[in-house]
Amino acid sequence: MNGELLSLIDAIVRDKGIDREVLIQAIESAMASAAKKGTGSESKEVTVTIDRQQGSITVMSDGQRLSSAEFSRIGAQTAKQVIMQKIREAERDVILGEFQDKAGTIVSGVVHRFERGDIIVDLGRTEAILPKSERIPYEEYHQGDQVQAYVLEARKGIKGAEILLSRAHDGFIRGLFALEVPEIGDGTVEIKALAREPGDRAKIAVWSKDEKVDCVGACVGVRGTRVKNIVRELHGERVDIIRWHDDINAYLAAALAPAQIAEIQADPATRQALVLVEDDQLSLAIGKKGQNVRLASKLTGWQLEIKSKAQLGAAAMPLRDVRGVGPTMEERLKGGGITAVQQLADATVEQLTAIKGIGDKTAEKLIEAAKEAVQAAQAKAQEAAAPEHPPAQSEPSSASESHEPQSGTSEQ
């Protein structure tokens, strides 16, 4: 019997991954509880000791050794229940510890079921939750689908270990690149910064510890294979890969790719920068709904203001340079909150007539004159830039456009 107990313990240790000593202590505690019930003296101090080598069991009550015959059937049943409970608790602790160690890594599982919009993922030994808030927008899954996710947290819940997963976390992209790019996995290439709007676009800045290893090329892969695999896993989310620079001007220019940057006026003290671009690059630098400049700002940690040269020229013009604006009119406009020529050009007749001393006809003339001044400034800026700054070949914004290792960005 004693040998059978040890064999059972060893089998549970192998199958469940539970620490042997923890299991034996749980059995001793259960048997002590059973012994109290068996003797009918629950007030007495009872201890049970199992020999770790031979499996012999010693039961002591108030200094006296008890025989196994003194265990009642009820007591034995209690021991069995307590043992099973302790085994389940120990197993949950093992799983919890395992996934606490896996926090911050990528795991794979199978979609098992859906609960209130959340996905329950079968990870093999346990289940995990992929909340709706942590999924990439517009993703759809069906029961049985394979899914990869980032282990966000592992905590102890009412029913045991609770594993929270995420596909929207920045760490998910970091983990995918670590799996797909060996140079990142071994530490040769490092992801210095990452900015992401899940389901739409992400920018990552990479750097190589080895000058012989092209960090961008390593991430893109031959013919873009590596980044395409990542984009496929992200269900089409675009990933721009840029080279990290010590020089802030070079870094900001790379972060705003694919737009071509004419000039950067950076203030390290406030971490703010004015970025000047040609007129035809303004919308590209800002991006759809401001996305490009927003991600670049998050990536670099700098507050960025994008202006075209024409805008800067018009903004620098004093209001008095606009036809029909004299000292008195200038004071009236400034009193009404209009301090720049561009503001005047963008104003409406209603806005201007709300200012004391300006009628409908005067307002129309002022707006028309301001627009002419802005157009003249734009033409002057373009004329000045044309001979000195010929169009440069920008880094392609998509791995599908170029498969060269030096490509600065990836899949669109």
Image (cartoon, rainbow, N blue to C red):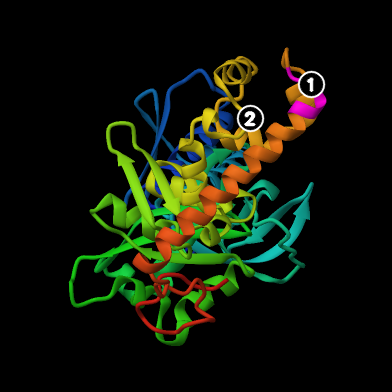
* Predominant SS of the magenta segment: helix
Q: Nearer the viewer, residue 241 or 126?
A: 241
Label placed on residue 359: 1
Quarter holding residue 222: bottom left
Q: CA distance from mark 1 to mark 2?
A: 13 Å
| Tag 2: amino acid | Gly
Label placed on residue 324: 2
Tell me: residue 79, above or below residue 283.
above
Q: Check if mark 1's residue and mark 2's residue have beta carbons within 8 Å.
A: no
Q: Position of residue 125 (x, y in %)?
A: 56, 61
- Left or right placement of residue 309 versus residue 20 in this view: right
Tell me: residue 13, above or below residue 27.
below
Label placed on residue 405: none
Tell me: residue 216, above or below residue 276.
below
Residue 229 counted in the magenta span: no
Disc 1, SS: loop
Quadrant location, the C terminus:
bottom right
**Is residue 103 at all visible to an observer of this figure?**
no
Question: Which residue is found at the position 31% from the left and 59% from the top?
Answer: 244
Range of magenta residues: 358-362
Q: Nearer the viewer, residue 340 or 203?
A: 340
Q: For mark 1, does the 10 Å Cα neighbourhood hold few (<14), some (14 to 19), or many (20 or more) residues?
A: some
- Left or right placement of residue 344 versus residue 208 in this view: right
Considering only order in the chain, which callout, 2 or 1, is on the residue closer to the N terminus?
2
Question: Which residue is found at the position 53% from the left and 52% from the top?
Answer: 378
